[in-house]
Image: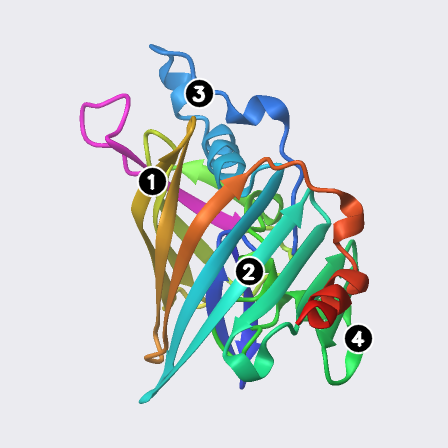
Amino acid sequence: MFNRTYRIGRPLVWLAMLLIGFAAISAGAQEQAPEGSSDAALDADAILERVNAAWQGDSFHGTIALEITLGSATKLHRLEVWTLGEELALVRVLEPEIDRDSGYLQLGDELWYYAPAIGSIKLPSIAIGDALFGAGPSLADISHGTLSDDYDVSVVGLPEGSDVPESYFLTLIPHLDAPVVYGKLELWITTDDVMERIVYYDQRGEVLQTAEFTDVIDLGDRKFATTIVIEGSFGDRTIERIEGPQFDLELDATFFSIETFESWGEAE
């Protein structure tokens, strides 16, 4: 989900997922807990793995519209995104027109930026966690990275007298050596494994930002939130709208290359 980055020394959210500290998810992680088994239903790791599996998939393609507000200024961006497995991601800028056909390519630990006017530039791998446009989502967020590897997770806050909640309330505490800036995350997840809300805390226990997931659609056996609104404690706001999401496509690994960017420029 959304990993974090810094802008002028302040952490900004852009989860869940996307887009790269990918974590491998076992095939069994997508299975629902057996009916009547409260222990299985309240297995925090299993809940989070099912959410990650629904969010990430084996591969992904979609268009993402971003509305990033900093103070009184709002910037609009439109991206086309592909991911394959845990280590391949390609982001093509569609709008604004001045940046069209530029983008980012992730190959394992390598990260490249491409622009038609200058060609390709290799970036430090740490930039995968940086905001793509100075604020808003990082490449790790856009490519649907996962949360589970860097945190210990537990289920808390069950309704009184209930073995199975109407929705799951999870807390995530980062490992001491985890490359994250958060002191704690709180997650609200529906019983059909859809993320509803995330609250991010700093090391002092103060709220840094919140993420709200809405406009859920059915994609086969998966439910997927197509709108994410991030409210930062410093007044920043980002709205991400995911259009035409497709999962588990038959993508060829050779598609993830600088040559793909170059071919788009040659076709115009």
| Range covered by the magenta-colored residues | 156-173
Q: Amino acid at mark 1?
A: Ile
Binning the other alpha carbons within 10 Å of mark 2 as few (below 14), some (14 to 19) or many (20 upward) gives many
- Residue 131 image-quadrant placement: bottom right
Q: Position of residue 6 (x, y in %)?
A: 56, 76
Mark pair 2, 4: CA separation: 18 Å
Residue shown at 61% from the left, 49% from the top: 150
Mark 1 or mark 2: name the one nearer the start of the chain. Answer: 2
The residue that mark 2 highlights is 80
Mark pair 1, 2: CA separation: 19 Å
Q: Residue 110 vs residue 150: left or right? A: right
The residue that mark 1 highlights is 217
- Which residue occupies the extreme bottom position in the image? 72
Binning the other alpha carbons within 10 Å of mark 1 as few (below 14), some (14 to 19) or many (20 upward) gives few
Magenta highlight on residue 47: no
Q: Residue 15 vs residue 70: left or right? A: right
Q: Position of residue 238 (x, y in %)?
A: 38, 70
Mark 2 or mark 3: name the one nearer the start of the chain. Answer: 3
Does dot 2 land on a helix, a strand or a loop?
strand
Mark pair 3, 4: CA separation: 44 Å
Mark pair 1, 3: CA separation: 19 Å
Mark yes or no: residue 126 visible.
Answer: yes
Does dot 1 land on a helix, a strand or a loop?
strand
Which mark, residue 32?
A: 3
Q: Amino acid at mark 2?
A: Glu
Q: Give the color scheme: rainbow, by chain, secondary structure or one colour.
A: rainbow
